[in-house]
Image: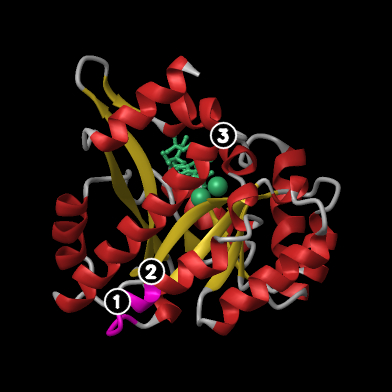
Amino acid sequence: RDAQSRIESALYDGELELHYQPKMDTRLNSLIGVEALIRWKHPTLGLRLPGDFLPMLSESRFEIELGNWILATAVAQLDTWRAAGFGTAMSVNIAARHLAHPDFVPHLRSVLTAHPDLDPGLLQLEVLETATLGDIKRIASIMAACNALGVSFAIDDFGIGHGAVNSLRSLPVRSIKIDRSFIHNMLDDDDDLATVQSVIGLATAFHREVIAEGVETPRHRQALLKLGCHLAQGHGIARPMSAAHMQVWMQKHP
Ligand code: G
Ligand code: G
Ligand code: MN
Ligand code: NA
């Protein structure tokens, strides 16, 4: 409770901000979009990563409020970049519980309405913890309602666990993201390589776009290209950065 109210204060004190990480088409060497990632600029502890503070919010009312703020802030930035001539797409992370909240679709609609010149097709929602989604039919219908607004989905942290194939079969998602834990050792661990290969095969068979996260080296990038995955995100391309730095980066990487 205490930790939670400190994060609430951080939001109201303006200490929370979104950073952005590029996603690239490694064949064309072109930017395909950016992912928004929450950061806490803590006055004494420095930059804190979401793994340090988001888990403290799980199941709380404030988790939903923060999720709404993240979505509104990311879309406002996307519209600012559009108006400045950067036609980039943006992905925003959404907890499964947030997506399932009854106010999610109305909130999304109001955020988009606030930016009438923005093409909603530039917005993608990356859904986390799809394994815990519960009633998959209900989630599929919420996703369909968002799709009707023009917004697409990615399944984040995709693996080959229980429910992965079912998610692909049942959910109207455009993309899947290969979890970075599989990419990390894929060049040294045959099981990880087989997993990456299987996920790419699965995505291809289901006509979904597949993007690898945690691409840290040119060797990762080349191995993924050989396996048929040409979309990548990771420190080997660029680390998450502030909006101002992201804009400079976009100028250099059209
Ligand atoms: O940035 P970092 O690698 O520390 O992120 C750790 C985790 O926190 C990732 O799984 C990421 O998806 C999640 N995360 C980052 N930003 C957001 C956000 O804005 N909303 C939600 N719900 N999760 C986020
Ligand atoms: O789970 P999610 O995809 O939302 O996590 C994205 C997070 O992964 C980002 O917040 C970022 O900090 C982290 N990340 C991005 N690229 C890399 C990478 O190449 N290596 C590692 N270890 N983490 C990365
Ligand atoms: Mn993500
Ligand atoms: Na991820």
Identify the mark nearer the N-term, 3 or 1. Answer: 3
Is 169 located above or below residue 160 in the figure?
Answer: below
Judge from the rendering whether residue 163 lies leftward or rightward of residue 90; answer left or right.
right
The residue at which mark 1 appears reads as: 115
Q: Disc 3 versus disc 1: distance between alpha carbons? A: 29 Å
The residue at which mark 3 appears reads as: 60
Identify the mark nearer the N-term, 3 or 2. Answer: 3
Identify the residue at horizontal 69%, vertical 74% (top origin). Answer: 172
The span shown in magenta is 112-118
Structural crowding at the residue carrying mark 3, measured as other residues with C-alpha within 10 Å and reported as few (<14), some (14–19) or many (≥20): few
Q: Disc 1 versus disc 2: distance between alpha carbons? A: 7 Å
Please check the rendered image and state whether residue 53 is part of the magenta-colored stretch, yes or no: no
Q: Secondary structure beneath disc 3? A: loop
Judge from the rendering whether residue 4 lies leftward or rightward of residue 197; answer left or right.
left
Q: Are marks 1 and 2 in contact (CB under 8 Å)?
A: yes
Tell me which amino acid carries mark 3.
Answer: Ser
Secondary structure mostly seen in the magenta stretch: loop
Structural crowding at the residue carrying mark 1, measured as other residues with C-alpha within 10 Å and reported as few (<14), some (14–19) or many (≥20): some
Is 125 located above or below residue 12 in the figure?
Answer: below
Across and down, in percent, residue 239 comes to 32, 43
Is 13 located above or below residue 136 in the figure?
Answer: above
Tell me which amino acid carries mark 1.
Answer: His
The residue at which mark 2 appears reads as: 111
Does the beta carbon of the residue at mark 3 sit less than 8 Å from ligand 1? no
